[in-house]
Amino acid sequence: MVDLNLVAIRLKKDEEVVLKPYVDTVGKTTIGTGRNLTDKGISIEENDYLLHNDIHDALDNLSIYTWFTSLDPVRQLVMVCMMFNLGPTRFAGFSNMLKYMQAHDYVDASIEMLNSKWATQVGQRARDYAQMIKQGILI
C-alpha cells in the first residue's frame, strides 16, 4: 500500500499550498493543496471543521471584551455570531452597542444593532439578534 504521508508530501511539493482561493491555470477556483472548489467543493465534515475553527476565532476575538463572560448564554451566542459575521474590526465599530452591552442595557444595545448598515444587509438575522439581546431568549 502506498504511504499516504509520502503522497501528501509530494502533492504539497507539486501543487504548492495556497491558503486563499485562487483561479488555477484552467479557470477553476482552487484552495489549499490543489483542492478544486469549482468541481468538488467541500464536504459537510470539512465545512464543520472550518466552522468550528471560525467559531473559536470569534471567541478569541471576544476575549478583549471583559464583560462578555458576564453575559447569559443567549446574549453570548449573539455576540459570537456577530463577531463571526463582522470580524473584529467591523464588530468594534459598534461602539455604542458595545457600551450598552457592557452596561447590561440590552434595550439600547438592541436599538443600536438595528441602527446600522449591517442590519439592512442581513435583514431578519439582525432583527432576530436584536430581539434575543433585548429579551435574553433564544428565537
Image: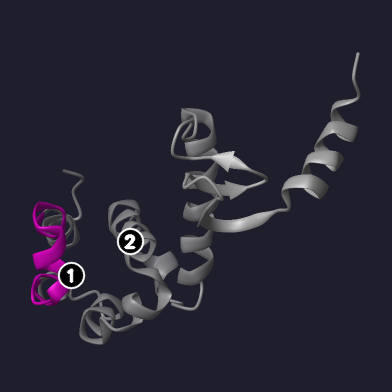
Task: Tell me the number on the disc at residue 118.
Answer: 1
Q: Amino acid at mark 2?
A: Asn
- Which residue reaches farthest top? 1
Q: Residue furthest front?
A: 26
Write the residue at 33% across / 57% down: 81
The question of residue 120 being in magenta is answered with yes
Mark 1: which amino acid?
Answer: Trp
Q: Quadrant of the N terminus?
A: top right
Residue 104 appears in which quarter of the rendering? bottom left
Q: Are marks 1 and 2 in contact (CB under 8 Å)?
A: yes
Q: Quadrant of the C terminus?
A: top left
Q: Which residues are magenta?
A: 111-127
In the depicted view, which residue is nearer to us: 67 or 82? Answer: 82
* Residue 119 versus residue 138 in the image, above or below: below
For this view, does 12 lie left or right of residue 119? right
Between 109 and 35, which is closer to the camera in this rendering?
A: 35
Q: Main secondary structure of the magenta part?
A: helix
Quadrant assignment, res 82: bottom left
Q: Secondary structure at mark 1?
A: helix
Q: Nearer the viewer, residue 58 or 18?
A: 18
